[in-house]
Image (tube, rainbow, N blue to C red):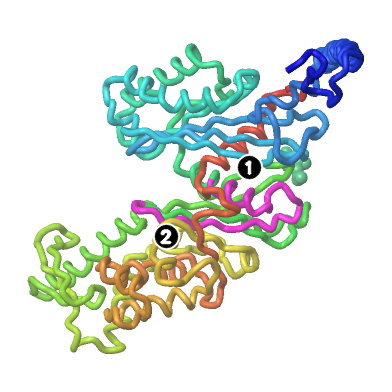
Amino acid sequence: MSGQDTYTGLGQYPSKYRKLALKSWLRLASIFLIIFGLGYLGITLFRPTSKVALVVDPRLESKFCDIPHPGRPLIQYVLMVDAGSTGSRIHVYKFNYCKDHAMLEDEIFQQIKPGLSSFDNDATGAAHSLDGLMEVAMKGVPESLRACTPIAVKATAGLRMLDQVKSDRILAAIRDRLTKDYPFKLIPKDAVEIMDGKDEGIYAWITVNYLLGSLGSPEHKTAATFDLGGGSTQIVFEPSFEIRDPVKGGPQLAAGEHRYEMAYGGQNYTLYQHSYLGFGLNEARKKVKQLIAQEASDSGRLSVEHPCFPPGFREEASTKDKKSEVTIKGVKKDSLTPATQEACYKEVRRILNKEAPCAVQPCSFNGVYQPPLDQTFAENPFYIFSYFYDRTYPLGVRDEFKLSDVKALMDKVCKHDVALFASKEQQEEVGAENHYCMDLSFQYALLRDGVGMAENRVVRSTRKIKDAETGWCLGASLLVLDQNRYCNSRH
Ligand SMILES: *[C@@H]1O[C@H](CO)[C@@H](O)[C@H](O)[C@H]1NC(C)=O
């Protein structure tokens, strides 16, 4: 390579003049680069808002709006701890105030075992058992909102069983730990308590009606909730009576335990609620078996074939008076007739104790007052949950159906012939549970003869509404927010 022919690698011309010109261009370019570079730096430094907005904590933002309703915070968290008998669960609810009322935006859920009651005398241990759940709360709620995030711990069945001295000590230890070691705000009233069974049903009713969008509006087109658990079954609805004359009065919900008055979203609600202890599905099974055993024993038999159960079933049951044991067997295939198919329902219906004295008229069953559905709750939606769902959904009776569909399903199952079911899944489902006929008979009796539902009444059965769980925790949290303000609009 000769000097003459030096290529700069940038220009195509091997000329000294070109080289010089290029050097000055480069110098000029560097100067420009430095000026623009400094300028860009200046812009980024002096426009902090736009840069910070890109890295803002999503926990502080709403997916639905940027600006909250006037006077409200954009985001409000609520922590609800459900201390059940087998374990404790935390729900970290994120609400937004894009509108004037709280809207559920997100939920974090975590559970731990065992339940508080298993700690017995060890109150401190019980309090510390919630640490894992509180860690979830600390992670879920941004630091700036923790002090204005309400928390409540509501214990259910398990702690109700423990004696009061022990359960009081456990509750006090939890209250103490939450106050001293965590930044959240205990709700002003009953922050750590054993919840009344009545409240549990009412809160679940709030959850359902909130998710349906029927709460807080003057029309009061609220849905009824009927939950069939293992130990008890609970009904809640808002009966409507004729418009009452302010002077003369008029029909209204009778006074008593069943009457629950509540304000929510600027509306007053007078609800009817009752929890039938001993009429959950498991308790009902026990009652029916005792009754079958008693009848057999009374007629001098030690064993009985019963149409409630499929061929091959066999179980020892003690009589109602606990004096003797009787073997209950499933019905034989060739002794099944249309009459025996009805027999299970007729037997099961007897445990409802329809003949019990009724102190305040009218009564549903077992002497319990209830405003008649056909007169005070004829039109609004009727939701049934838990075991009602578990026994109908797998067999194809789903979402929305009539009570007569439950009866049709009961009739089919009580023929004790799995071949009547079309799909293999359904055949396996029915085959795996000997109590299907009895359970469906009880459910039909409960709806028809118990609470007095008409055959053509439409019911809805579900686990979730708008993708949210239908338990009591959400309703309890909504009520917390309805009764007090926590985060203010600066947040
Ligand atoms: C609800 O009850 C309260 C107090 O009893 C009353 O002041 C208020 O006006 C009632 N609200 C409605 C919407 O009826």
Badge 1 vs badge 2, beta-carbon distance below 8 Å:
no
219 magenta-colored:
yes
Q: Quadrant of the C terminus?
A: top right
Q: At which x and y percent is residue 76?
A: 66, 30
Residue corresponding to mark 1: 262
> Is 298 located above or below residue 15 in the figure?
below
Q: Going by the image, does 154 lie left or right of 318?
A: right
Residue corresponding to mark 2: 367
Q: Residues within 10 Å of mark 2 (few under 14, many from 20)?
A: some
> Is 230 located above or below residue 395 in the figure?
above
Q: At which x and y percent is residue 55?
A: 69, 24
**Where's ligand 1: which quadrant?**
top right
Q: Residue at x 71, y 47 (%)?
A: 216
User: Magenta region: which residues?
Assistant: 204-231
Q: What whole-number distance in Å separates the C-alpha atoms at marks 1 and 2? A: 26 Å
Element at label 2: loop
Q: Residue at x 61, y 19 (%)?
A: 143
Q: Residue at x 65, y 18 (%)?
A: 144
394 magenta-colored:
no
Q: Amino acid at mark 1?
A: Met
Between circles 1 and 2, the one closer to the viewer is 1
Would you identify the image quadrant in which residue 351 lies?
A: bottom left
Residue in front for this viewpoint, 7 or 444: 7
In this rendering, does residue 32 appear at all?
no
Element at label 1: strand
Q: Going by the image, does 292 lie left or right of 32?
A: left
Dot 1 or dot 2: first in sequence order is 1
> Is 43 located above or below residue 377 in the figure?
above
